[in-house]
Amino acid sequence: MKVGIIGGGAIGLLAAAYLSQNHTVSVFVKSNNQKQKLNKYGVKCGALCGTVEAYNNPENLEIQDLLIVTVKQYDVHTIIKQLPSNVPCLFLQNGMAHLNLLEGLPNSCAVGVVEHGAVRMSEYEVQHTGLGMIHLAHFKGPLDVAALTDKLSVHNFRFTFKDDYWLMLAEKLVINTVINPLTALFGVKNKYVITNPCLCRLAKQLCAEASQTLNLSFEEQWDRVKQIAERTGANQSSMLKDLLEHRHTEVDAICGFILQHSKEKSPYHSFVVDAIHALEIKNIKGEAT
Ligand SMILES: NC(=O)C1=CN([C@@H]2O[C@H](COP(=O)(O)OP(=O)(O)OC[C@H]3O[C@@H](n4cnc5c(N)ncnc54)[C@H](OP(=O)(O)O)[C@@H]3O)[C@@H](O)[C@H]2O)C=CC1
Ligand SMILES: CC(C)(CO)C(=O)C(=O)O
């Protein structure tokens, strides 16, 4: 297959390194510098070195068989304006705020949840920091997503099929809306969300608000949060990493989505959304602490 990957960040480069073993991969990036590096060195991920073609314009998007969109959620709105309507698209963002943008697209679409951990080390190098699965579900249009999971799967980079996109994304959203803001606000690794008794109480409140908003069982979701916090205990969450590197976070796509969709008041979510934005502003303005 001709697979086009939009975004040359951590997940885009990870996907390019693995998928280029079996497919012809093109990576669509923003900067000319990254394009040149990828064309010269390929994508490196540990012992893997994938050959790719890189572009920093949308011209070759329409010749792809599949486009995998790996930009952060807040950049999806600029990408969808460039997508050729004939090519099926797979969106791999955390959060659920991009779903309303996909509804207006003419393209066949799938959505996915990434369990891998990845860190971009340079414009063409990525470190695979945590091995997981990528779960895919059908969102709209005539796309055989179950067949796609088989075509894309390769050793250490496997895809599985889920039949309910909403449940798949909602369950991941609960995990992110609990673990990400608390770890980012308190500057701690994931396990402290359950091992620190005060953070654990805050985590339970966030989990209760999210479960109620999404109409999910609190007990089941809290068990999942505890499992993931334990399994990824030594990791820094993506929101913590974004703040440490003075980048924009995905708090609106994650916690903001809960706040927007809750029928009851969600005071813990109100607090974390404002608190994370306050830290983003502090980082951008370089305010002294
Ligand atoms: N990294 C991880 O371990 C995990 C990430 N995820 C999710 O995956 C998604 C991607 O995350 P991640 O890869 O870490 O994010 P990154 O910030 O590392 O990568 C996003 C990339 O998109 C690029 N980009 C933005 N706008 C455009 C554009 N118009 N055209 C081309 N490229 C563009 C950015 O370029 P530039 O830097 O030049 O602005 C950046 O390289 C997020 O929703 C995240 O929550 C989920 C699970 C794990
Ligand atoms: C599951 C978790 C919390 C792992 O770090 C994650 O998805 C993230 O950091 O965004």
Image: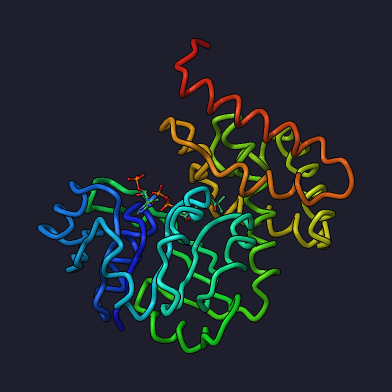
Does 200 sit above or below residue 186? Answer: below
**Nearer to me, 240 or 67:** 67
Quadrant location of the N terminus in the rendered image: bottom left
Residue at the spot x=43%, y=75% of the render?
A: 158
Q: Residue furthest right?
A: 264
Image quadrant where residue 18 sits:
bottom left
Q: How is this picture coloured?
A: rainbow
**Nearer to me, 4 or 267:** 4
Residue at the spot x=64%, y=36% of the render?
A: 182
- On the picture, is 101 further left or further right than 247? right
Image quadrant where residue 148 sits:
bottom left
Q: Residue furthest top?
A: 288
Residue at the spot x=30%, y=66% of the render?
A: 16
**Nearer to me, 123 or 195:** 123
- On the picture, is 143 further left or further right than 69? right
User: In the rendered picture of this protein, how many numbered marks are placed on residues?
Assistant: 0
Could you say where residue 127 lies in the image, as x and y percent from the top left?
Answer: 31, 53
Residue at the spot x=42%, y=59% of the render?
A: 70
Could you say where residue 121 lies in the image, as x and y percent from the top left?
Answer: 28, 46
Does 154 sit above or below residue 262? Answer: below
Could you say where residue 253 lies in the image, as x and y percent from the top left?
Answer: 61, 49
Could you say where residue 186 lies in the image, as x and y percent from the top left?
Answer: 60, 29
